[in-house]
Image (cartoon, helix red, strand yellow):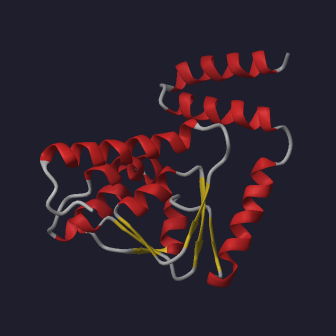
Amino acid sequence: DMQGRSLEEMRQLLDVCGEFMQLIQRIPQPVVAQVQGLATAAGCQLVASCDMAVAGESTGFQAPGGHGGWFCHTPGVALVRAVGRKRALEMLFTGDRIDAHTAAEWGLVNRVVRDADVAAETRALLALATRGSSQSKADGKVAFYRQADLGTAEAYVFASEVMATTSQ
């Protein structure tokens, strides 16, 4: 999709991709990634952008630009927020694949299950995440992502206000 595109076309494509990744976190519903196979570059970015993720045991994750090609700048935005600086930079600089268990250890996915169980386990996690008040979950998701970008003291002020107002 990217080969042969002009600079303006690349900007437009990457803007759409970035907007989509942010939309996942802006919508009020929980979004759970069901991951099988190899999640590479924007696929890895997509997993990192979702609220939660379930991966099969044979699943791999990769930001391949570190192999000497095109550095994965935009996947790095989501990766650093999901796994932290050191681990994101390891993936970005080396371009090496990490396995599903490493992804879980690093916080990129919530659960690793048998490949045959990925779909069922994804739906089970989604069912747990959506039980109860949908309005409460929606308010909680919006507030979570907003406070995550604040400093600690500001986050507590914000979260306390949200919790107080939603108690009424």
Horizontal side, residue 128 vs residue 93: left or right: right
Name the foreground residue: 93 vs 133: 133
Horizontal side, residue 69 vs residue 29: left or right: left
Horizontal side, residue 139 vs residue 55: left or right: right
Horizontal side, residue 160 vs residue 41: left or right: right
Please tell me in which quadrant of the rendered image residue 54 appears: bottom right
Residue found at x 52% / y 83%: 58
Residue found at x 54% / y 75%: 36
Give the x, y percent position of residue 153. 54, 20
Please tell me in which quadrant of the rendered image residue 116 appears: bottom right
Q: Look at the picture and state if 38 lies above or below 44.
A: below
Give the x, y percent position of residue 166. 78, 21
Query: How many circles with numbers are drawn on the protein?
Result: 0
Q: Which quarter of the figure is the N terminus placed in? A: bottom left
Give the x, y percent position of residue 77. 35, 46
Residue found at x 73% / y 60%: 125
Q: Look at the picture and state if 132 lies above or below 94.
A: above
Give the x, y percent position of residue 22. 46, 40
Q: Which quarter of the figure is the C terminus placed in? A: top right
Residue found at x 50% / y 40%: 23
Please tell me in which quadrant of the rendered image residue 167 appears: top right
Name the foreground residue: 137 vs 6: 6
